[in-house]
Image: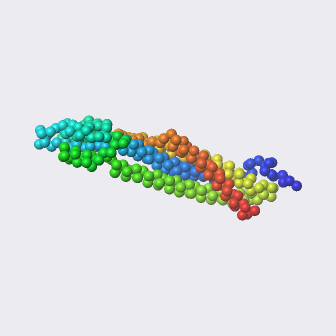
């Protein structure tokens, strides 16, 4: 005799899962988990984007600092003459291109970002700057070039940004690894929460599940009910967490831009990174669905 309660004939709502405590708390738990995951991912990606942009802007640029003459030296050679001497040397150096003496006003504006408007005295000996780039195939001995500059204008310094840029990029890599570890920890914690919530639901509905078994329901049928409900809860909570995280990320980006305006590249996400982050709620729902499905099948296989 064929059981009247079969996979084909039974509606998919025998278990009142919508009235569980899990149905009330799971969306908020998933929202918190997705919020933390999105924040960790977005901060790592945006910080890495800023570092990469800074690296691309500065890695090919070399800066020369030409000291301003003291009052006793000013009569012998002015600051403009010192800059022109160094610029002439650079023009005569093979492989050096894009020579650009920086306007003193730009240097003052840059310092004002740190020191505040009106805090820079006119007598402050601000070095004059010259930016230049090297041709792609150039092989310039920067140490020898530094010695030639020092011979022309004592105190001149050449900065190719390489050392501190390498340290900055290494720091960005550490942030990315840290974000990955945080994301993994959040994923594991989410799995554990889903497993315990599902097992709690099995205990709560144990009498109903036994009745369904007597009526002919299979384990897979019962597991699908848990999986469907947990997908809805996980996805809905994930969307809430995503929206909150995106709002906070946007606010942090605006604050970052105000603090370091003109000093650092913008703190932002690329379009494909936004798209990747946007599917995290869907992944959260799928994780909740698959985990609960596997948990129910495993537990029922041990009981039945």
Q: Looking at the figure, which quarter contains the N terminus?
A: bottom right
The answer to whether residue 259 is above or below residue 201 is above
Using the rendered view, name the quadrant where residue 103 is placed.
Answer: top left
Residue 69 appears in the picture as rendered: yes
Between 148 and 206, the one nearer to me in the picture? 148
Between 143 and 253, the one nearer to me in the picture? 143
Residue drawn at point x = 28 percent, y = 47 percent: 142
Image color mode:
rainbow
Residue 83 appears in the picture as rendered: no
Q: Is residue 300 left or right of residue 285?
A: right
Between 258 and 83, the one nearer to me in the picture? 83
Q: Position of residue 300 (x, y in %)?
A: 72, 60
Using the rendered view, name the quadrant where residue 129 is placed.
Answer: top left
Q: Position of residue 86 (x, y in %)?
A: 22, 40
Q: Position of residue 23 (x, y in %)?
A: 64, 51
Question: Furthest-right residue in view?
Answer: 1
Give the mark count. Answer: 0
Question: Furthest-bottom residue in view?
Answer: 302
Residue drawn at point x = 31 percent, y = 43 percent: 62
Between 269 and 135, the one nearer to me in the picture? 135
The answer to whether residue 296 is above or below residue 263 is below
Q: Is residue 263 left or right of residue 13?
A: left
Q: Looking at the figure, which quarter contains the C terminus?
A: bottom right
Residue drawn at point x = 65 percent, y = 53 percent: 290
Q: Position of residue 100 (x, y in %)?
A: 29, 36
Residue drawn at point x = 48 percent, y = 53 percent: 179
């Amino acid at each position: 005799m064929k059981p009247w309660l079969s996979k084909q004939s039974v509606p998919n709502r025998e278990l009142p899962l919508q009235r569980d405590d899990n149905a009330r708390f799971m969306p908020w738990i998933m929202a918190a988990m997705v919020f933390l995951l999105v924040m960790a991912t977005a901060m790592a990606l945006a910080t890495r984007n800023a570092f990469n942009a800074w690296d691309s802007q500065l890695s090919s640029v070399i800066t020369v600092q030409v000291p301003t003459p003291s009052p006793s030296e000013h009569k012998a050679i002015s600051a403009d003459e010192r800059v022109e001497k160094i610029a002439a040397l650079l023009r005569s150096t093979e492989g050096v291109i894009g020579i650009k003496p920086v306007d003193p006003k730009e240097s003052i504006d840059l310092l004002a970002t740190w020191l505040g408007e009106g805090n820079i005295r006119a007598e402050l000996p601000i070095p004059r700057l010259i930016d230049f780039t090297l041709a792609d195939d150039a092989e310039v001995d920067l140490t020898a070039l530094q010695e030639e500059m020092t011979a022309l204008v004592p105190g001149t310094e050449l900065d190719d940004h390489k050392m501190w840029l390498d340290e900055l990029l290494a720091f960005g890599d550490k942030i990315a690894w840290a974000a990955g570890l945080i994301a993994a920890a959040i994923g594991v914690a989410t799995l554990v929460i889903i497993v315990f919530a599902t097992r709690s639901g099995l205990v709560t509905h144990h009498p109903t599940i036994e009745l369904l078994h007597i009526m002919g329901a299979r384990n897979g049928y019962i597991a699908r009910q848990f999986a469907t409900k947990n997908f809805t809860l996980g996805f809905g909570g994930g969307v809430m967490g995503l929206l909150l995280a995106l709002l906070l990320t946007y606010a942090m980006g605006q604050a970052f831009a105000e603090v370091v305006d003109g000093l650092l590249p913008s703190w932002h996400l690329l379009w494909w990174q936004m798209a990747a982050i946007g599917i995290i709620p869907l992944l959260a729902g799928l994780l909740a669905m698959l985990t609960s499905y596997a948990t129910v099948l495993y537990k029922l296989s041990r009981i039945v």
